[in-house]
Amino acid sequence: MTDQRPAPRPAPADLWDTVDALWTWLDAGQPAGGREALLLRMLKLSEEVGEAAQAVIGATGQNPRKGVSHTWEDVGSELCDVVITALVALRTLTPDAREVFARHLARVAERSLGTTAP
């Protein structure tokens, strides 16, 4: 018996190409549109932050009923989900997400480090 599923496409190498691909995929399957879709995309970010918090609680064993239920590697994975979701949310707000983010990062670097971002 052979696997009939198509081979997975390689992910785009560039961060922003990947963000654009995820945004396109999410929009194609979006049951809501317009302002509602935008608001739901922003709420997804809160959901991911909550999952990161849950992982920290689990990694530190702060819930006596569950004990240690997560690892710090789980926390890292959840933080990656937060970052990805935030970048897709930014792309949802503007097709110029790459430039908006680069300008903002440069301002933060200048303010915090006294330099511009590479």
Image (cartoon, rainbow, N blue to C red):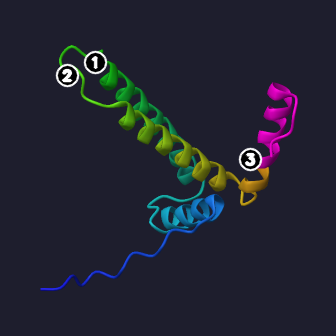
**How busy is the neighbourhood of tag 3: few (under 14 within 10 Å), some, or many (20 plus)?**
some
Q: Residue at x 72, y 60 (%)?
A: 95
- Where is mark 3, residue-wise? 101
- Asked if the residue at tag 1 contacts the one at tag 2, i.e. Cβ–Cβ closer than 8 Å, the answer is yes
Structural distance between the alpha carbons of marks 2 and 1? 7 Å
Identify residue type, mark 1. Gly
Magenta range: 102-118
Q: Residue at x 50, y 67 (%)?
A: 25
Residue 66 disc label = 2
> What's the residue type where badge 2 is placed?
Lys
Q: Residue 115: which quarter of the image?
A: top right
Pointer 1: residues within 10 angstroms few (<14), some, or many (20+)? some
Mark 3: secondary structure: helix
Question: What's the amino acid at mark 3?
Answer: Phe
Residue nearest the observer in this picture, 60 or 63: 60
Q: Is residue 77 above or below residue 58?
A: below
